[in-house]
Amino acid sequence: MMTLQPQCTSPRSHRIRVQQTELHYLEWGTATNPPLVLLHGGSAHAHWWEHLTADLARAYWVLALDLRGHGDSAWITPPAYEIEDYVADLEDFISRLGLAPLILLGHSLGGFIALTYASAHAEALRALVVVDMGFRLRQSRRLRLLSHFPAPIYQDEEDLLRRFRLLPPETRVPVSLLHDIARHSVCQLPDGRLSRKFDRATLTREPRDLTSRLPHLTCPALFLRGSESQNLSTATLAEMVALCPQAHGLEIPEAGHHVFLDHPVAFLQAVRSFLPDTTEEFTCKT
């Protein structure tokens, strides 16, 4: 399998106040390029995209957001991590930075947030890319149980790198990339040990079904599935494409749920081949 060459591009780190909370985001590229906003999945963070951004920043102004309760964004007390909460943050983020019209790309939970936003704001989007996520969100008994467990504690970096796993754990991600993600996934406790950054209350949320809203998603859309994914079936992918006026579906070979980690070269090729026709002009239907 082809792999990306290491890139020496450090992101610019920012904080922004939205919806009475503080969010953190990373930025690459120049604001004179079309804006591309990246939304990570559940229990992840903005640095998950970092191995792709040197390539994407050649053509786009790339902004990767830490969702509320994740990464270096604020935790919410009492917990408020429903899809509507994330979408409201995204609406405010886009408005405050004047990003519309933009390209929106989301994976897993971030994909469902992007899909929800797009179904209500297609006119604000140049294009939408949703990675390995369907249009129905169901409650997970496993995640509900995990949300009640204490956060894992690691004695040191060696312990972290030995025990760190993705969810779901099945992946082809190179060890070096997995270790980079792990290092950005923790904060240091006063006693020197390490703890995961995300709020475990983010693991549960109410079910959602976007079936009736997808026909309103009139901007160009690309739905990607990993060929080995247990999260998004080929049948659901086809159903999503059929429901959306300007949607295309594509399966990335040799990839599971973590498509852009498992096969980043094929992922970038798919995204790049889709986006050129959508960035020259604003093509969304009204």
Image (cartoon, helix red, strand yellow):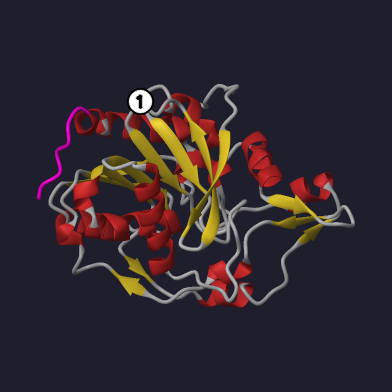
Please say whether residue 108 is visible from this viewpoint.
Answer: no
Q: Is residue 263 left or right of residue 70?
A: left
Task: Determine if the magenta segment contains residue 232.
Answer: no
Q: Which stretch appears magenta?
A: 280-286
Q: Residues within 10 Å of mark 1 (few under 14, many from 20)?
A: few
The relative height of residue 32 versus residue 230 in the rendered view (above or below) is: above
Residue 37 sits in which quadrant?
Answer: top left
Q: Is residue 16 left or right of residue 90?
A: right
Residue 122, image x and y in percent?
A: 21, 51
Farthest left residue in view: 286
The relative height of residue 77 versus residue 155 in the rendered view (above or below) is: below
Q: Residue at x 55, y 56 (%)?
A: 22
Q: Of 98 and 34, which appears nearest the observer?
A: 98
Residue 230, image x and y in percent?
A: 43, 59
Q: Residue at x 25, y 45 (%)?
A: 125
**Three-letter amino acid code of the residue under disc 1:** Thr
- Report the residue marked by disc 1: 32
Q: Of 261 and 65, which appears nearest the observer?
A: 65
Q: Is residue 196 left or right of residue 188?
A: left
